[in-house]
Image (cartoon, helix red, strand yellow):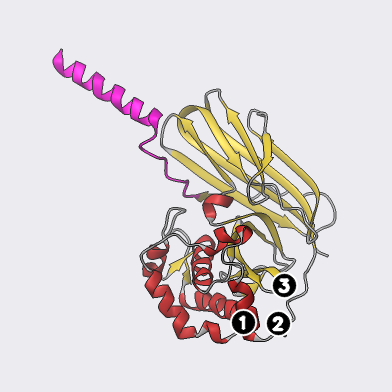
Amino acid sequence: MPRFNIHHITKYLYEAPVRDSTNQIMLYPLKDEFQEVLKHELSISAEPNINEYNDYYGNEVGCFMHTNPHRELVIDSRLEVITKNRSLPADDRPCNEQWEELEKLTWQVPFIDFLREPPFQGSEEIAEMIRHLKSRSFTPLVATGKLNQYVFENFSYIQGITTVETTIEEILKLKAGVCQDFAHLLSAMLRQINIPARYVSGYVCPNKNGMRGEGATHAWVEAYLPFYGWLGFDPTNNCVATDMYVRLAVGRNFNDCTPVKGTYKGTSNQTLEVGVTVSYQDSAFSKDRPVMMKQQPEPTPINNSYRRFVEKQKLLQQQQQQQQ
């Protein structure tokens, strides 16, 4: 059973002091029969009170406020976790029987969210991909593996060309993206053939370098297979998620699983840096600080009430100056 020490730092730097920073964090690892959390240390700038609760999908969520003016917000998470491997499905039942079992899930509440994909441009292109692969002629396990491989082989892994706001249509045009893009794409493909699919955020912890997704949070997909349950597939690395993966949260998409998100009053110019290190020793956390890499922060809405108020005040001041 692998034992990992994971150090994850998220740092926001602001051009000018900001205030009333309200944030949500999903940095608490899932706890189940395949994942045992031995220790979790969480420190945040100004040491705010953190209110914790479990969301609709069973994820542990934390919320906090940093009201005083500040030019930096640092969220430091240190995690010690043991993961356990799960046996793969036997996949020995007749193909038709398995697809019929999936049909029964169509209107069952636990699966509805993971079967419905909001309408998007490009759905016909995805349908054509699925028809080309003749996915329904295989068992759900084999079909999922083929779609996983298809994304890996036909979409290039290129960092920096997409953001958290990138749509599936844009990914199809670019034929490229990163782990969250590939997870969204694979989820849409699986849902089209009536296989429940959920987005997973967490960490990939390989014994050797070379896996895409190291040095930051990672994303993959869990597909629900009949007579078995949820099994993880990673289209970024074309593999099944094993005990080398640590899960933080599950949901319909990135928005349900965002590790850190929030809002504040102040300048819209900000810099986001993220660093993740994984050590494999059974001893204390690594003393090496994660290498911080600049990320693209979530776009700041320009139509929220506070920003509209600020823009209105600026406009009034300009009008008054012109009248003088």
Q: Residue furthest left?
A: 323
Looking at the picture, which amino acid does disc 1 mark?
Answer: Val
Determine if the magenta segment contains residue 316: yes
User: In this orientation, which residue lies closer to the viewer: 178 or 254?
Assistant: 254
Q: Secondary structure at mark 2?
A: loop
Question: Considering the numbered disc 1 on the image, is that residue within a helix, a strand or a loop?
Answer: helix
- Closer to us: mark 1 or mark 2? 2
Residue that carries the numbered disc 1 in the rendered image: 142
Separation of residues labelled 2 and 3 (CA atoms): 9 Å
Residue 115 visible, this orientation = yes
Image point (48%, 42%), residue name: 271
- Give me the residue at 72% from left, 85% from top: 92
Q: Which residue is mark 2?
A: 91
Q: Quadrant of the N terminus?
A: bottom right
Q: Is residue 283 left or right of residue 322?
A: right
Kind of residue at badge 3: Tyr
Residue 231, by quadrant, is bottom right
8 to 263, vertically: above or below: below
Q: How far across and down, in percent of the image, does residue 186 sit?
A: 52, 69
* Crowding at mark 3 (Cα within 10 Å: few <14, some 14-19, many 20+): few
According to the picture, the residue beneath numbered tag 3 turns out to be 228
Q: Earlier in the sequence, mark 1 or mark 3?
A: 1
**Disc 2: CA contacts within 10 A as few (<14), some (14-19) or many (>=20):** some
Q: Which residues are magenta?
A: 295-324
Mark closer to the chain start, 2 or 3: 2
Q: Nearer the viewer, residue 154 or 308?
A: 308
User: Which circle's residue, 1 or 2, is located before the other in the chain?
Assistant: 2
